[in-house]
Amino acid sequence: MSPIVGFGIMAIVVLLVLGLLLSFIPVGLWITAYFSGVKIGIFTLVGMRFRRVSPSRIVNPLIKATKAGLDLDIDKLEAHYLAGGDVDSVINALIAAQRAEIFLEFERAAAIDLAGREVLSAVQVSVNPKVIETPKVAAVSRDGIEVMVKARVTVRVNIERLVGGAGEETIIARVGEGIVTTVGSATSHKEVLENPDLISRTVLSKGLDAGTAFEILSIDIADVDVGRNIGAQLQTEQAEADKRIAQAKAEERRAMAVAKEQEMVAAVQEMRAKVVEAEAEVPKAMAMALREGKLGVMDYYNMQNIMADTTMRKSISILGKEEDTNSQVKK
């Protein structure tokens, strides 16, 4: 092998080794940090590689913070990164808070970020309040008229209560509850229509932002509409229910009357059956009385005459009743 070829192979090996070292050791990032005023050792960057931390995710935000005048510890940034936080978002939030003269420590910002909230957005809303629009809330005044109210709530983020504080849903629910209470306490729906600011004053006085991550600045009534006449509707439904109850009770009484009538008919039929059975025994008794001499022939004829007279009288009575009925119908 010629010396030139050996020298070329050695040069290639050296270049490969140098390339691997440069890819593992972020020399370019260290140079950028050095000229940006960030004092960080090259071995610290190598240690980040071993700890599976991307040096650029730590150094670039640190450079940004240093240029903004923030004094931060690189170990805290690395710890926040290892905990799963967004270092760049935290640094941006700290810079925005500093510019807005809002007191915000790195530990508080890191805690907000790890809690799952957007810390930069929280600082922006703290500087520039946002408006939360509630859906239409239906409430009924004392006169039974439904009133539908839509409100706009202006809120500002309270950074101190951002960790553990309730969110926008709680604000909307509490404002809706305040609207229902205020409208329900009104004597007439006209009172709400004439003074919609009554709702705002009542809701604001309840301190609805307690325990939330927001501070309510104002509540403005955006829209008030008149809905259904709930009172009249309830009265109508109550009357219909009373009518059905009365019909059910009448049907129950009719069924009981029919049952009693059927019982009476059954009793009459049973009595008639007994009478027929008793009448069937009469000829036998008369025949026995004639054979034994206890009843004479004349007595038998007299009894037949009495029975015939009784039958005739019944027929005459029935004919008289029918004539009276026909005459009343004709009249």
Image (spheres, grey):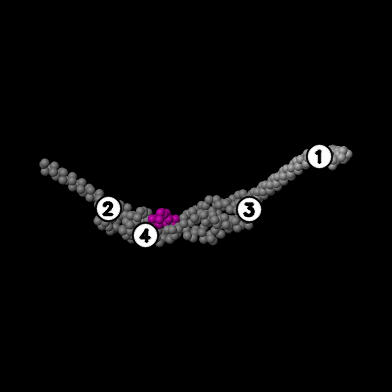
Name which residue lies at 78% across and 40% down: 281
Q: Which segment did they paint magenta?
A: 106-126
Report x, y in % for residue 230: 62, 51
State which quadrant residue 121 falls in: bottom left
Query: Number of numbered discs present?
Result: 4
Which secondary structure is most common in the magenta stretch?
helix
Disc on res. 90: none
Disc on res. 106: 4
Q: How far separated are the C-alphas under marks 3 and 1?
A: 89 Å
Q: Earlier in the sequence, mark 3 or mark 2?
A: 2
Q: Is residue 190 above or below residue 310?
A: below
Q: Residue tagged by mark 3?
A: 144
Q: Amino acid at mark 3?
A: Gly
Q: How far separated are the C-alphas under marks 2 and 1?
A: 136 Å
Badge 3 vs badge 2, beta-carbon distance below 8 Å: no
Q: Earlier in the sequence, mark 4 or mark 2?
A: 2
In the rendered view, does 15 fall on the left or right side of 284? left
Q: Earlier in the sequence, mark 3 or mark 1?
A: 3
Q: Secondary structure at mark 1?
A: helix
In the rendered view, does 125 fall on the left or right side of 79? right
Q: Residue tagged by mark 1?
A: 288
